[in-house]
């Protein structure tokens, strides 16, 4: 018979349990461990016996290392790099070339070539006067890009000018007049010319803005277009000579009027012949009235009863109660918001029976899955929340429960029975004691 049984937890006032024997506890002395061990140990090892310490192999210095010895018995032994001569030096940052350490005597003949000298590495103050002449430059070794702007003065050039006609012009200079030319050949000239031009000619041309329409021309032309009062158009003439005029329909230009849907007419394009015709608004409304709509004297009305299947693509707000008479409601929405704090299931039945919620797709199949069900017949109709492993979304009748949900009750055993909490697996807490119903 099921009953409440006490659960033993840390701090319970009980004697040591039988299955605690042969286990080490904190602070226990006299325990002996045998075998091999790995990992780390706490303490200084003073209590260990039978452990023999052994030094590592001794180290000795080699070439380039200052003399030292180390047998593993001491700490803080330093190892230093040793250099020979004054070319290199040893600093805290490492081995480096000493200041003035490399002289001509350390360099082999022809050891430094042009390829070894970086760009801009040698400046003029390190070159003796007259030390560089043409015999020290290889053919083509100096290009224009290697010479700085204004780097070579005209005085250093053998040819410092050019002669055009009989006029000598220094390099880098300009001349406003040139003498001694016998002929000039060009496809086009820009600017003023003086002198003679036997072969020059002027093409026939019309001076700008010299032709007056209607005076210097013949034929018909339109000076401008104008808008008619309330004509329903907007006309824009060309802003320049030859500019096109535009005509656009402008409903705002029409005179306003009170609409009489039973008598007024509107303009339409007749699809039969493509011409523009008029049609009464009443006839137009009657022509567009479809299912569940009626038209009277140009006014549409929605019937009190709407038949057929309909899809609304935007939001719908119902200010009164919504009653749906059918067998199923499908709410295919991303989020479902319900204002009611309590949801009533199985509202149409007064008979004790199971009810619950199916989590669709939870078992990998659409329209069915694991369900949270109220097992109404549990323990002589006490009822208990349980889980059904897999059931259809349109299932009816009582279900087979896979397992029940356990709960926690706080109070005495008598009170738990009154509350129907004395069910297998439930936990009861009374004062500082914990019980389970088994």
Image: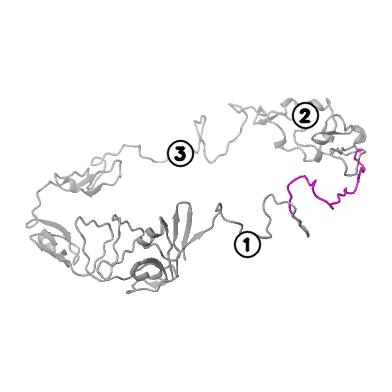
Magenta segment: 39-66
Relative to 125, residue 317 above or below? below
Identify the residue shown where x is 30% and y is 60%.
343
What secondary structure is the magenta-colored segment mainly? loop
Residue 18: which disc? Answer: 1
Residue 57 belongs to magenta span: yes
Indicate which disc, 3 or 1, sits on the residue closer to the N terminus: 1
Residue 19 pos. (x, y %): 63, 62
Dot 3 corresponds to which residue?
201
Task: Work out whether 309 lies above or below 141.
Answer: below
The secondary structure type at the circle numbered 3 is loop
Of the residues under marks 2 and 1, which one precedes in the sequence?
Answer: 1
How far from the left and from the top, in percent, is residue 140?
77, 40
Give the residue displayed 68% in from the left and 30% down from the top: 149
Quarter where residue 14 is shown: bottom right
Residue under circle 2?
Answer: 123
- Neighbour class for label 3 at 10 Å: few (<14), some, many (≥20)? few
Q: Alpha carbon of mark 3 to alpha carbon of mark 1: how far?
A: 131 Å
**Contact flag, marks 2 and 1 (Cβ < 8 Å):** no
Q: CA distance from mark 2 to mark 1?
A: 95 Å
Q: Label 2: state its secondary structure.
A: loop
Secondary structure at numbered mark 1: helix
Neighbourhood count class around disc 2 (C-alpha, 10 Å): few under 14, some 14–19, many 20 upward: few
Residue at figure coordinates x 47%, y 59% from the top left: 435
Q: Dots 3 and 1: beta carbons under 8 Å?
A: no
Q: Is residue 92 magenta?
A: no
Q: Earlier in the sequence, mark 2 or mark 3?
A: 2
């Amino acid at each position: 018979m099921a009953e409440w049984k006490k659960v033993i937890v840390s701090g319970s006032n009980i004697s040591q349990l039988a299955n605690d024997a042969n286990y080490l506890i904190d602070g226990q002395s006299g325990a002996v461990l045998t075998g091999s061990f790995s990992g780390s140990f706490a303490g200084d090892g003073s209590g260990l016996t039978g452990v023999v310490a052994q030094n590592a192999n001794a180290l000795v210095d080699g070439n380039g290392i200052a003399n030292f010895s180390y047998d593993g018995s001491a700490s803080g032994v330093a190892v230093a790099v040793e250099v020979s001569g004054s070319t290199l030096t040893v600093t805290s940052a490492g081995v480096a070339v000493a200041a003035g350490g490399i002289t001509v005597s350390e360099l082999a003949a022809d050891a430094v070539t042009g390829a070894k000298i970086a760009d801009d590495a040698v400046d003029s103050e390190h070159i003796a006067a007259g030390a560089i002449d043409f015999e020290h430059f290889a053919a083509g070794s100096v290009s224009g890009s290697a010479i700085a702007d204004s780097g070579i003065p005209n005085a250093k050039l053998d040819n410092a000018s050019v002669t055009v006609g009989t006029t000598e012009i220094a390099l880098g200079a300009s001349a406003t007049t040139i003498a001694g030319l016998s002929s000039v050949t060009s496809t086009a000239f820009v600017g003023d010319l003086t002198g003679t031009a036997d072969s020059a000619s002027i093409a026939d041309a019309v001076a700008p803005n010299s032709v007056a329409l209607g005076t210097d021309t013949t034929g018909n032309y339109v000076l401008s277009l104008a808008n008619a009062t309330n004509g329903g158009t907007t006309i824009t003439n060309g802003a320049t000579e030859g500019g096109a005029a535009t005509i656009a329909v402008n409903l705002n230009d029409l005179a306003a009027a009170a609409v009489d849907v039973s008598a007024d007419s509107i303009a339409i394009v007749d699809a039969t012949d493509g011409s523009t015709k008029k049609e009464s608004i009443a006839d137009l409304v009657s022509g567009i009235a479809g299912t569940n709509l009626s038209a009277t004297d140009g006014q549409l009305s929605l019937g009190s009863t709407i038949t057929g299947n309909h899809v609304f693509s935007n939001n719908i707000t119902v200010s009164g109660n919504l009653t749906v008479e059918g067998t199923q409601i499908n709410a295919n929405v991303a989020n479902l918001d319900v204002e009611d704090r309590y949801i009533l299931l199985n509202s149409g039945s007064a008979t004790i029976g199971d009810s619950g919620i199916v989590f669709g797709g939870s078992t990998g199949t659409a329209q069915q899955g694991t369900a949270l069900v109220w097992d109404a017949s549990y323990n002589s109709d006490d009822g208990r929340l349980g889980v059904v492993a897999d059931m259809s979304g349109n299932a009816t009748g009582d279900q087979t429960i896979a397992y029940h949900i356990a709960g926690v009750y706080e109070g005495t055993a008598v009170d738990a029975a009154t509350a129907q909490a004395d069910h297998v697996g439930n936990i009861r807490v009374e004062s500082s004691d914990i019980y389970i119903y088994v």
